[in-house]
Image: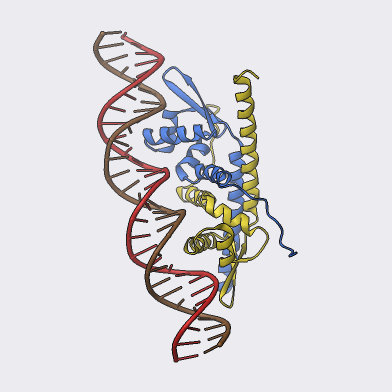
Chain colours: A blue, B yellow, C red, D brown
Amino acid sequence: MTAKKKKHEFTDEALELIASRFRVLAEPMRLKILHTLGDDEMSVTELVEATGAGQANVSKHLAMMLDAGIVARRKEGLSTYYRIADETIFDLCEMVCARLGERLATHHQAIKRFSGR
Amino acid sequence: MTAKKKKHEFTDEALELIASRFRVLAEPMRLKILHTLGDDEMSVTELVEATGAGQANVSKHLAMMLDAGIVARRKEGLSTYYRIADETIFDLCEMVCARLGERLATHHQAIKRFSGR
DNA sequence: TGACTGCATTACTATATAGTGATATAGTTT
DNA sequence: AAACTATATCACTATATAGTAATGCAGTCA
């Protein structure tokens, strides 16, 4: 008997589910929309203006994120107001940002050291 | 003066950087490789056997994750041994899994209620 | 040296999707 | 009703990349 630890197996389906979650956050424009939304509720037009993206594009991203359960919407008259439905995405972003910050700092140190302090 | 909160702006570059980080985790096969690695150090051949993927494919994914600083490698003789270099990815995965679990549970409840308890 | 092995890389195909202009749809105003 | 507005959707193009077979290459062994 080796010391090999039997790992918990993920089905391909589960892996695809997790990956698809990350895929939502893997586009700069979607991150921009999410960050622009923040704690507020905003109409599509407002988001279009704030992000500078095309209306069709914003609508498509919103529809995608609605389907993923990351945003929610409320229709009122002609407008549709979107808001964040899953606050945990901000935690994910913060973790990534923190890690990126560390890496950059490390690189910075390394470069300083390399170039002779 | 409105109550609108001035949001911290991200540059397009920063957004792209964050997105690219998520993009690494947005592929089932990469998640599989990372999860297979776990705390161990494994050669490419071992990873190929464990994942069932093609050798070229595994190599490409590993090269990509090496570049992203998520794995590290050590060459010994003919073999190259890879290991996790950034443990925080597991925290990210756990957060996503937890959230997915919640969502599934909620949906399950909703379906039960809809179908008459 | 030559045969072999493990990994990386290249060239290619297939697929997914971001962005965009045009159009459809539904609610509003006149 | 007709005109207008906000959003969603469609059709399309361009681009990125996952997977794969073939090849390159460096280290090992006979």
Residue at (62% x, 61% y) in the render = B85
Report which quarter residue D25 is drawn in: bottom left
B17 horizontally vs D5: left or right? right
The relative height of residue A54 versus residue B27 in the rendered view (above or below) is above
Residue at (61% x, 54% y) in the render = A99
Between A102 and A3, the residue placed more toward the observer is: A3
Residue at (75% x, 64% y) in the render = A1
Quadrant of the rendering where the C terminus of chain B is positioned: top right
The relative height of residue B10 versus residue D10 in the rendered view (above or below) is below
Between C16 and A42, the residue placed more toward the observer is: C16
Between A91 and B94, the residue placed more toward the observer is: B94
| Image location (x, y in percent) of residue A71 | 53, 32
Between A83 and B87, the residue placed more toward the observer is: B87
A8 horizontally vs A23: left or right? right
The relative height of residue A41 versus residue B54 in the rendered view (above or below) is above
The count of marks equals 0
Report which quarter residue D3 is drawn in: top left
| Image location (x, y in percent) of residue A15 | 57, 47
| Image location (x, y in percent) of residue A91 | 62, 42
| Image location (x, y in percent) of residue A88 | 62, 38
Residue at (44% x, 17% y) in the render = A77
The relative height of residue D13 versus residue B102 in the rendered view (above or below) is below
